[in-house]
Image: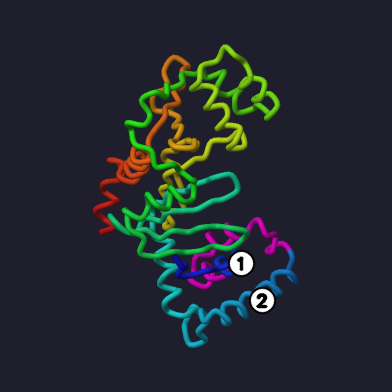
């Protein structure tokens, strides 16, 4: 699928500023150290104006100096309160909730932002499968895979292990097959869990809240899912989920009861 808009980080920051969202523009540009050097900032302004013109996004007759279509898109992007941020290693993408069945997808790669509009709920599953390289197992395929129960200390230590230490654990004969397979997958995933977080952002009040985070990791045919909601007595459960079950976890995240009011207001 071809993106509807492609913007560099500097172009996105400039577009936000031109549309009147200076605080968000400063946040987008803060890591580029442009605002601390006047000469560098002036060069940035000229270069960004040129590239926006080259893409057909510049309109001298407009108050914002942006073409009406891109200005409308920036407004819509900023005013989506509910967002889902997905992280896999160094890749980040967002789902911006427009209404009960429409999203704007933002994929960030090497300081470029690719936006896909009019993304439907049924498209989200395929996006997750593609971006996280998820298998397409069913619940019936997981009957022989045992859930894991780890103490909080063991879980925290696991996140500090290096590949050599993992290899030593995997080679031990006294660990069961589920744990051994989990450790292999953990090593393959660079000793990290992927995560998906629900964000509530209120631009008018300059508030942002990370409401809930899902931690998971792909295996060849299924997903290891960390059940943080079920932590009790310092025990953490890591369970195998089919792709469908994991998708419904993400769907439920979007449809949290605490956000029903927002759902109604965004229709």
Residue 28 colored in magenta in the image:
yes
Is the residue under label 1 in contact with that under label 2 (CB below 8 Å)?
Answer: yes
Residue appearing at x 29%, y 51% in the figure = 262
Q: Out of 26 and 225, give the one closest to the viewer.
A: 225
Residue 220 colored in magenta in the image:
no
Placement of 1 over or under 235, stated as above or below: below
Question: How many numbered discs, if any?
Answer: 2
Question: How far across and down, in percent of the image, does residue 41 sit?
Answer: 69, 70
Q: Which residue is mark 2?
A: 47
For the record, the magenta segment spans 14-36
Question: How far across and down, in percent of the image, does residue 233 sit?
Answer: 44, 14
Q: Regarding mark 1 in the picture, which secondary structure is present there? A: helix
Which quarter shows the N terminus?
A: bottom left
- Looking at the image, the residue that sits furthest to the top is 174
Q: Is residue 129 left or right of residue 162?
A: left
Question: How far across and down, in percent of the image, does residue 240 sit?
Answer: 42, 29
Residue appearing at x 40%, y 72% in the figure = 72
Q: Is residue 212 left or right of residue 46?
A: left
Residue appearing at x 60%, y 48% in the figure = 90
Placement of 173 over or under 210, stated as above or below: above
Q: Earlier in the sequence, mark 2 or mark 1?
A: 1
Q: Out of 53 and 241, give the one closest to the viewer.
A: 241
Q: Which residue is mark 1?
A: 10
Query: How far apart in space, not on screen, are marks 2 and 1 (Cα)?
Result: 9 Å
């Amino acid at each position: 699928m071809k993106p509807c808009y492609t913007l560099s980080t500097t172009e996105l920051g400039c577009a936000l500023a031109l549309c009147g969202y200076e605080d968000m523009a400063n946040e987008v540009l803060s890591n580029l150290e442009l605002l601390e050097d006047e000469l560098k900032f002036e060069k940035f302004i000229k270069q960004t104006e040129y590239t926006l013109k080259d893409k057909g996004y510049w309109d001298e007759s407009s108050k914002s100096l942006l073409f009406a279509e891109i200005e409308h898109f920036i407004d819509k992007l900023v005013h989506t309160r509910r967002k889902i941020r997905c992280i896999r290693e160094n890749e980040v993408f967002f789902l911006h909730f427009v209404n009960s069945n429409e999203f704007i997808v933002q994929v960030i790669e090497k300081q470029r932002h690719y936006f896909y509009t009019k993304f439907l709920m049924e498209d989200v599953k395929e996006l997750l499968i593609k971006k996280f390289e998820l298998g397409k197992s069913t619940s019936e395929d997981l009957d022989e895979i045992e859930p894991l129960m780890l103490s909080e200390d063991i879980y925290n230590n696991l996140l500090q292990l290096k590949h050599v230490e993992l290899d030593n654990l995997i080679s031990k004969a006294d660990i069961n097959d589920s744990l051994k397979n989990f450790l292999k997958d953990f090593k393959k995933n660079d000793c990290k869990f992927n995560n998906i977080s629900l964000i509530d952002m209120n631009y008018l009040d300059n508030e942002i809240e990370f409401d809930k985070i899902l931690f998971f990791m792909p295996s060849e045919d299924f997903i290891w899912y960390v059940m943080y909601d079920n932590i009790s007595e310092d025990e953490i459960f890591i369970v195998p989920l089919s792709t469908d079950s994991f998708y419904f976890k993400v769907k439920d995240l979007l449809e949290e009861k605490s956000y029903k009011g927002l759902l109604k207001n965004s229709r």
